[in-house]
Image (cartoon, helix red, strand yellow):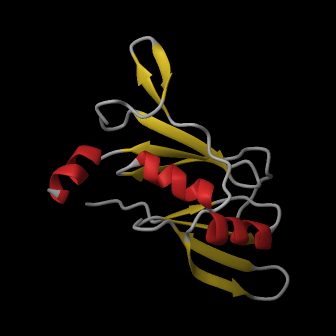
């Protein structure tokens, strides 16, 4: 039995601001924006190439904004991905990688899977992690 994660619900304080952030800055596609009166609105956005989407709106989640989420976006080239987000106006941390002595600046020199990271937050504090996976496979397939 396969269990596929296809949707993550986010808590947001302003649906229109969140929609603008994800579609205009983060570059996600808008899949749905459905309203049923003032008590229900469902907005779904998907990162480029992803099988999993995020959704937010009115009348979808319980709880408050006090517990932001952390989600990972896996990318084949972290430098290109970071540059694209920065170019769209997203404040993204510098890239860093883990060494035996702790964090070091820049992408992992060998582009080892799961070892290079950059971070950003949406307007409500939900944290996104860019993580590089598949860089070496990407380079081999380009040859």
Give how far across and how far down residue 40 sits, in percent.
76, 80
Q: Residue furthest right?
A: 38
Viewport quadrant of the C terminus: bottom left
Q: Quadrant of residue 67?
A: top right
Q: Position of residue 73 (x, y in %)?
A: 47, 52
Point 78% across, 73% down: residue: 16
Image vertical order of residue 15 relative to residue 75, above or below:
below
Residue nearest the observer in this picture, 116 or 63? 116
Q: Which residue is at a point 82% across and 88% down the rendered structure image?
A: 37
Q: Residue at x 47, y 54 (%)?
A: 81
Pick the front one: 44 or 2: 44
Camera sees residue 112: yes
Q: Is 137 displayed left or right of 70 in the figure?
A: left
Q: Examine the rendering and report whether any part of residue 59 can be seen.
A: no
Where does the image place residue 138, in percent across and percent down from the top left? 24, 53
Q: Residue at x 76, y 55 (%)?
A: 123
The answer to whether residue 12 is above or below residue 36 is above
Between residues 8 and 22, which one lies in front from this camera angle? 22
Query: Which quarter of the image is occupied by the N terminus?
Result: bottom left
Residue 9, x across and y down, in percent: 62, 62
The reply, left or right, for residue 17 in relation to residue 78 is: right
Above or below — where is 99 with respect to 122?
above
């Amino acid at each position: 039995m396969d269990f596929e994660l296809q949707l993550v619900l986010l808590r947001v304080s302003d649906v229109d601001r969140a929609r603008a952030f994800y579609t205009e800055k983060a570059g996600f596609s808008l899949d749905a924006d459905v309203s049923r009166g003032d008590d229900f609105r469902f907005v779904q956005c998907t990162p480029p190439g992803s099988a999993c989407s995020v959704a937010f709106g009115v009348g979808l989640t319980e709880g408050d904004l006090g517990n932001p989420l952390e989600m990972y976006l896996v990318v084949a080239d972290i430098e290109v991905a970071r540059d694209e987000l920065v170019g769209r106006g997203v404040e993204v941390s510098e890239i860093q990688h883990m060494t035996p002595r702790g964090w070091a600046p820049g992408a992992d020199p060998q582009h080892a899977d799961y070892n290079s990271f950059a971070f950003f937050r949406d307007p409500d504090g939900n944290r996104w992690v860019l993580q590089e996976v598949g860089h070496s496979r990407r380079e081999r397939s380009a040859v």
